Amino acid sequence: MPLNSYFAEISEDVEKRLDILTPPADLYPPSIHQAMRYSLFAGGKRLRPVLAVTACEMFGASRETALPFGVALEMIHTYTLIHDDLPALDDDDLRRGKPASHIKFGESTAILAGDALLTLSFKLLSDTRLFPEVSAETLLKVSAMTAEAIGSTGTIGGQVVDLDMEGAEPDMAALEYIHTHKTGKLIVAAVKGGALLGGADEPAVKAITTYGRNIGLAFQVTDDILDVEGDAKLLGKNPGADQASGKLTYPALLGMDESKQFAGRLVANAIDSLSSFPDERSKHLKSLAEYIAKRTH
């Protein structure tokens, strides 16, 4: 199956499961549930759930095995976007071409909507009924790994350093830390968690983790590039925000050409990390790696 069809098929399954597992908009108190659903269903690529499901299926498990995990990841990702857009952080008015949550619902409700999505994600991850084919031990391992990936040594840590470095002198080590933690850690968790749910052994999990680290950084390098030369209509937000706020980016430190070459090397490394797996099993993960560097939004 071509990647576009495969991607769309999983995304559709994720959408359906998100709708089922997220409280309805009219559930009391409706304001919080409307805000949660507004950001969840605002349009996103569903890349993290797709990566999780693809990694799981690679080891022969069913798609259903990883779908609840993918839904939890999308809730976590959406929480980070809601909070990133707040005036105290990136201060963005648009997200995916629509008013950001705090513009639509107010800052207080936006903060609480993000908190609620994060909390709900771990409720799902602790519900063994959603993972009938997975042992409680494996589910606990995946849950703990996900929590670590988004905590103070993961996504939140990357966000903190991103804020600390605004307007600071260029620092490649700090930039790599920001990108590998703020964005990369959750992408690594997606493929590693999917592999664990699929029954991967230790060497396979190690290879998948290497793949995740490379595509996670490639994703953010491409984001930096798109912030300079991306199309606002495709991005769903105004480009140039990073430069305006004095953020560290790869184009600012390396230049545009070298940044594109670096992203290409990361994708090549990711694909190479899967060389021990048969092509038929790994083809979709390899195609997803190439998609990440070539995407336009």
Image (cartoon, rainbow, N blue to C red):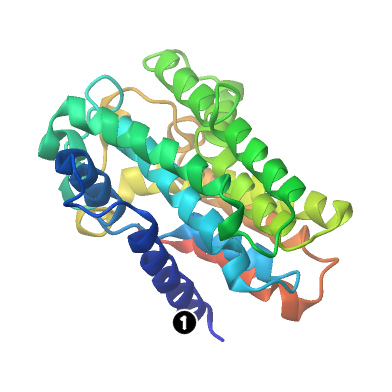
Q: Nearer the viewer, residue 71 or 283?
A: 71
The quadrant where residue 135 appears: bottom right
Q: Nearer the viewer, residue 122 or 246?
A: 122
In this rendering, is residue 86 above or below 277?
above
Tell me which residue sits at (60%, 39%) in the image: 146
In this rendering, is residue 228 above or below 275?
above
Horizontal side of 149 relative to 89 (left or right) equals right
Regarding residue 257, the answer to whether it shows in the image is no
Quarter in which the C terminus is drawn? bottom left
Mark 1 Cα shell of 10 Å, populated few (<14), some (14-19), many (≥20): few
Regarding residue 12, the answer to whether it shows in the image is yes
Tell me which residue sits at (23%, 33%) in the image: 110
Tell me which residue sits at (39%, 36%) in the image: 80
Residue at disc 1, secondary structure: helix
Q: Nearer the viewer, residue 48 or 249?
A: 48
Horizontal side of 282 relative to 156 (left or right) equals right
In this rendering, is residue 2 above or below 218?
below
The residue where tag 1 is placed is 5
| Residue 166 x, y percent position in the rendering | 38, 17
| Residue 116 x, y percent position in the rendering | 35, 36
Tell me which residue sits at (52%, 31%) in the image: 155
The quadrant where residue 30 appears: top left
| Residue 200 x, y percent position in the rendering | 80, 60
